[in-house]
Image (cartoon, rainbow, N blue to C red):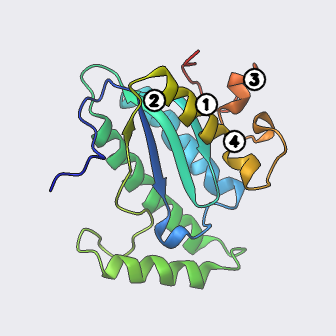
């Protein structure tokens, strides 16, 4: 049975979520989040990603995105997740200050062994859970949800105070990535 959570038209605007396996808070350190940022920048510059909004949390990422004409959003997400998973695992393995290294690598390895799509480790959950935002109401709802994620988690009091989010851009403060404002 086909999933209702599929990208049918890459030029449509989608709300996308991808999470670390078992919701491990593997992105809690800023330099791990920076790997996601750099990869998103690369996808914008070289792979046709159009980014309208984002937030990088400790165990998941939300995007509102589409692809330029001639590019496939599913392919962009696949490449983004493949690159970042390898890079993040390598950084975790080689970080002598990572106190949770053995525990995280054990989880990534045990998840990788249960999935034939992996060579050794699995960092990201398989699904991206894309939702087409085909109305102004849906766009407003998902944009608000995405930007308020750090507030709900108690990380900041105001959405624009969270550095790893496009809420700053929507508040008139230049953020870490170039985005296309939805309004």
Q: Earlier in the sequence, mark 4 or mark 3?
A: 4
How much space separates mark 3 and mark 2, taking CA atoms? Answer: 22 Å
Residue placed under numbered mark 1 in the picture: 177
Callout 2 secondary element? helix
Question: Depth-wise, is mark 4 or mark 1 nearer the camera?
Answer: 4
Question: Depth-wise, is mark 4 or mark 3 nearer the camera?
Answer: 4
Query: x, y (%) of residue 165?
Result: 66, 38
Label 3 with label 1: CB-CB less than 8 Å: no
Give the label on residue 161, or none. Answer: none
Callout 3 secondary element? loop
Q: Residue at x 38, y 25 (%)?
A: 134
The vertical placement of 105 against 70, above or below, is below
Q: Earlier in the sequence, mark 3 or mark 1?
A: 3
Quarter of the figure with residue 66: top left
Residue placed under numbered mark 3 in the picture: 171
How much space separates mark 4 and mark 1, taking CA atoms? Answer: 18 Å
Callout 4 secondary element? helix
Q: Residues within 10 Å of mark 2 (few under 14, many from 20)?
A: some
Question: Depth-wise, is mark 4 or mark 2 nearer the camera?
Answer: 4
Q: Earlier in the sequence, mark 4 or mark 2?
A: 2
Question: Depth-wise, is mark 3 or mark 2 nearer the camera?
Answer: 3
Residue placed under numbered mark 4 in the picture: 148
Query: x, y (%) of residue 32?
Result: 62, 57
Q: Residues within 10 Å of mark 3 (few under 14, many from 20)?
A: few
Callout 1 secondary element? loop
Query: x, y (%) of residue 75?
Result: 28, 41
Residue placed under numbered mark 2 in the picture: 44
Q: Residue at x 35, y 76 (%)?
A: 112
């Amino acid at each position: 049975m086909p999933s209702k959570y599929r990208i049918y038209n890459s030029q449509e605007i989608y709300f996308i979520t991808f999470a670390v396996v078992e919701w491990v808070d593997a992105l809690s350190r800023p330099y791990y989040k920076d790997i996601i940022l750099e990869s998103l920048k690369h996808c914008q510059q070289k792979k046709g990603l159009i980014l309208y909004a984002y937030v990088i949390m400790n165990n998941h990422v939300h995007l509102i995105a589409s692809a330029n004409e001639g590019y496939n959003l599913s392919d962009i997400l696949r490449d983004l997740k493949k690159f970042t998973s390898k890079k993040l695992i390598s950084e975790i393995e080689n970080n002598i200050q990572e106190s949770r290294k053995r525990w995280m690598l054990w989880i990534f390895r045990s998840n990788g062994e249960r999935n034939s799509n992996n060579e050794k480790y699995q960092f990201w959950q398989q699904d991206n859970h894309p939702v087409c935002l085909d109305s102004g109401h849906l766009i407003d709802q998902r944009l608000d949800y995405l930007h308020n994620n750090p507030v709900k988690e108690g990380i900041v009091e105001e959405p624009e105070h969270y550095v790893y989010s496009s809420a700053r851009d929507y508040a008139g403060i230049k953020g870490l990535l170039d985005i296309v404002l939805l309004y």
